[in-house]
Amino acid sequence: MVRKSEIVARQLALSAPEEVTFEEGGSTRLTPARWVPELSNRCPVRLEGTWQVTYWPFPADEKSLLGSACGEAKWEEVEQPGKVFYYDPEESPHTIEKWNRVTLEHLDPQDGALLRREVRIPEAWAGKRLLLRFEGIYPAGVIYWDGEQVAEQWSGLTPLEVDVTDRARPGSRHIVAVRLYRRPPDVQMDMPRHAIEFAGLCREAFLHAVEPVHVADYVVRPTLDDDYQTGVLAGEALIRNSTDQEVEALLEVSVADADGTVVAAEFYGVTIPARTDNTVGFDLNAGAVRVWNDERPHLYALRLRLTCRGQAEQEIAQRIGFRRFEIKEQRALLNGRPVKFRGVNHLTYHYQHGMYTPREYLRECLTLMKRANVNAIRTHFFGPRDLTDLCDELGIYLLQELPIDWGHSYVHLPEKLGPMLHRMEAGVRRDRNHPSVMVWSIGNENMPQNEEVHRVFTEHLRLVNQMVKAVDPTRPTMFPPPGPAGRIKGIFETRYGDIADIHYSFTLIRDLNETGVLSGNPRTWEPTFEEDATREQLLQGPWKGVWFSSEYGIMNLQTDLLNAPYVSIIADVMEDPLSGKNTQQVFMDRLRREWGYMRDDPTCLGGAYFPWMAAGAGDPWGWVRWGEDADWGVVAIDLTPKPAFWAMRVIFSPVRLPERITWHPGENEFTFTVHNDYTSIDLSECTFRTQMGGGPPYMSMLREWRDVPVSCPPMSAALITVPIWNSGTLQTLEQGSPVVLRVTVLDPNGFRPIMADVLVVPEQANLAHEAEITIGPDTAEAMSE
């Protein structure tokens, strides 16, 4: 019997699965969430490629099918990672009894498949520890080695590792098998409603080998000193001795810059008794470093080298970034400066491979985000390791979602506490060494159904938060709440995490900002409501005064339906379908309004538009089955930008220019305000290229250009002047006609975050066109006149 207050420590100390009973009543199953880091100086045996599959119902039990009854099953070939199942695009839900995209209750609990493949163990691995790793089995699976069950994985988005040393014979061949379950008991936590009933290996799988004395785990915490220039690195490594003798080992910790120059290195000796783990702490000063952020994602190479007499040297490599993210005085600061996340929700899905997203596809997807001036992602599945690696490299802030989805019906249940804690520990352990991970986004849209379960429900969420903080005390947490529904006008979630969150409605945060009082914040779906609270009262809890909107903007954005009347889905200001606006205009109006509010509130960290791309399977130019039945998002599933992509790119631009300015007679320059929303780039580092010409009808046909020096610090505004260097432009203004000043901004890398036409209107404007546009063979002659 254990108390719930002890359950986090119990989970962290776990070495084998364990069923525990609570003194408060009920029980849960705890599952370890640890794995051994793979070595950079030793090649793993990868398991991607062709597997054999047979589908349930089976003619015999799984063990028999992997042994003597093998021939009784019909085996087909399938590529893994990739789909073994997803929703049949030719079968409509109404034809399926009890169809439910959230609970999958239309599927038999035994429904699934059996996968198998042969693997050869290298002879050179003799005498080493052999480890079998699955980065993701979705939604769940049981692992077999030569027909014997060796592990279970009931968390579809987190890694699993099993030691097969005593079962594997170097130089020999073995059979690895996975029994897939399409509807495991905790499938709802892993968001099947967006997965289109995908089942299969959703991420890579491999075998790797380590020496008998090895690094069994490590954590690094690179940050900046108070000068925001000096890099400091603290961390610890867990050294495991699996031999029967006490051993002496030497751990070298080094950090090198992009040129390979070592900027810090230390050696640490350690004695490890037989069959024991020992922890080595380290602390290094890297001196003046190049900091990591979205605009300049400078990375360093961390290396851990372990030497021990009688065995080969082992090396672990990790890319790290020196950065310091903190909340001070109700402001989010990165490297000592204010930061704003221009984010989108990323649903990890591929239109052919399902939940498996190849690295090259992810790179293309994230590069497209950067081109849209997106600098942050809220993952709406716990994303793959490749996603985190690429965000480190490309400079994208991650609000990494840990999987507890739509838990109103189960979070309070004792038996669900173990699976939730496992997902938290496993997710945080995997990604806590990455600079791009800024915030742990815990679960999605969880609120108690009624007052009867409220106390236990909130107790469990606080234990979940405690688990995340125990594994990584350096990052803030937030708990994305549901959006408005029925009598609930919105939820402003300040009760569990460091950062408050809100979905789809800004009513409550507007009221709090305007009145200083939060009123009408729901406690349950009944609904019942919290008592009114002032900002000062709210700050007495875990909330640190900064908020984020991890979902806003949801709209139907079918690629072909540019004039669809059903545009906004959940919004404070709903568009009249008879307004006459097309979909693009509604999108632009709403994004300007909602993003503009977040951008201009200094207590707001930013927001994540929902979504970047909808989960969908099929032919993007033909029939597609959509997750949650809708093509949301600003890009199509094959990464073709929709019209909304271009509008988002402009509205998210880190350089903002006025749409219209007034010219007064006698002026020989244009004067206006520019806003610099960059985190670290002064506009003096950018190229500010100007073009100007005559007025209508050819006012946008510009060829000549001049660069103008501009200076404006990050996250500020400045008044700038642009000389009127084109005589035709000045003449047109003097005649009373408007002109355009075209401004193209190029960042220090030559990327164009924005090109904008500023309409310049004379104080006494004559807007009438004096001539028709000439079309045809006379065009050139007319333009010359």
Image (cartoon, grey):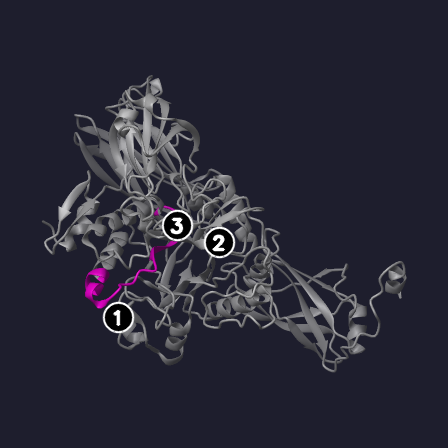
The answer to whether residue 199 is left or right of residue 448 is right
Disc 1 element: loop
Residue 63 x/y as whole percent: 26, 27
Q: Which residue is mark 1?
A: 540
Count residues near mark 3 (Cα–Cα under 10 Å), then give few for <14, some for 14-19, many for 20+: many
Between disc 1 and disc 2, whose residue precedes? 2
Magenta segment includes 329: no
**Quadrant assignment, res 752:** bottom right
Q: Which residue is mark 3?
A: 381
Vertical placement of residue 332 versus 42, above or below: below
- Amino acid under label 3? Phe
Disc 3 element: loop
Which stretch did the figure color magenta? Answer: 432-458
Residue 770 x/y as whole percent: 83, 75
Instruction: Confirm or deny contact between disc 3 and disc 2 (CB under 8 A).
Output: no
Count of number-bearing discs: 3
Magenta segment includes 447: yes
Which residue is nearer to you in this view: 184 or 44?
A: 184
Count residues near mark 1 (Cα–Cα under 10 Å), then give few for <14, some for 14-19, many for 20+: few
Q: Which residue is mark 2?
A: 294
